[in-house]
Image (tube, rainbow, N blue to C red):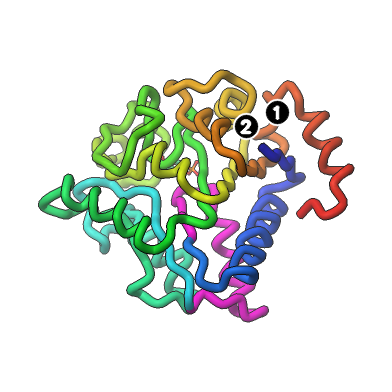
Amino acid sequence: MEIIVSDSVEEMSRTAARLVARTLNSKPNAVLGLATGSTPLGLYKELVRMHQEEGLDFSQVTTFNLDEYVGLTRKHPQSYHYFMHENLFQHINIPKQNIYIPSGTTDNYEAFCSWYEQRIVECGGIDLQILGIGSDGHIAFNEPTSSLGSRTRIKTLAKQTIDDNARFFDDLAEDVPVYAITMGVGTILEAEKILLLANGASKAKAVAQAIEGPVTSMITASALQLHPDVMYIVDRPAASALTMSDYYEWIQTKMPDAP
Ligand code: GLP
């Protein structure tokens, strides 16, 4: 596990974008796993800039998003379909048919979830998975006590997550869907490389538990400790509860090609 502590959210986003660009430069038809939420916004903005100003090419890229709210149509402003289109897809040259996002409106969730898992495999698996982290330590919508072997499925959201995400909805908590369709922890762990981003003091406890605590379904991000190639990029407030942060920062100064 590699932990990079950034001085700012902007630096965190730029470092993450460089890693994505490096992946695409070495494998133009890479499969990316994408996350939503406020955390990856700066990363997406930087990727759009790299595409527009430096020609970063997405023409052969395939993407799989982690999750979607159940019941929201793709045109709903709070749907993750809408979020991805607004913040990334409409600004880059990715072919529409290469974009996969779980459906929040299918009439057969079980069949959809199996199909989604199968498509990931048929596309060769995810080369680089981008993750954020919930304040309760969840990844995607794998809430506390989710099986660490879980696959794409319907999940009931935790009260904490509903409260955290209420800021995006008009009528606050009343409007936040209770269910989501999400890749499982087991699905995420099959990615070749995983990059988790976190910023802000509200993530400090979850980040510390995920990196330095025991592997537990109570903090689903802790399952990343079982993966051989995980990088965390966190800003200083998000790193503030890590007991070994001096060590992580010291390692960075010793690594000649640190991103
Ligand atoms: C939601 C998403 C997660 C995301 C989390 C944190 O629960 N399903 O993928 O990591 O929110 O969101 P934010 O980045 O806005 O803090």
Q: Are marks 1 and 2 in contact (CB under 8 Å)?
A: yes
Q: Is mark 2 within 8 Å of ligand 1?
A: no
Residue visible at 31% across and 46% down? 170
Left or right: where does residue 230 sit relative to residue 7? left
Q: Is residue 54 above or below residue 192?
A: below
* Residue 75 part of the magenta segment: no
Residue that label 1 marks: 240
**In the rendering, at what x and y percent does residue 77 appear?**
32, 58
Boundaries of the magenta span = 32-59
On the image, which quarter does residue 2 sit in? Answer: top right
Q: Quadrant of the N terminus?
A: top right
Q: How many numbered circles does the render carry? A: 2
On the image, which quarter does residue 57 sit in? Answer: bottom right
The Cα atoms of the two marked residues, 1 and 2, are separated by 7 Å
Q: Residues within 10 Å of mark 2 (few under 14, many from 20)?
A: some
Q: Quadrant of the C terminus?
A: bottom right
Left or right: where does residue 218 sit relative to residue 52? left
Q: Looking at numbered disc 1 in the image, what kind of residue is underneath it?
A: Ser
Residue that label 2 marks: 201
Residue visible at 43% across and 61% down? 124
Residue visible at 58% across and 23% down? 209
* Residue 52 part of the magenta segment: yes
Q: In terms of depth relative to the viewer, which is nearer, 189 or 178? A: 189
Q: Looking at numbered disc 2 in the image, what kind of residue is underneath it?
A: Ala
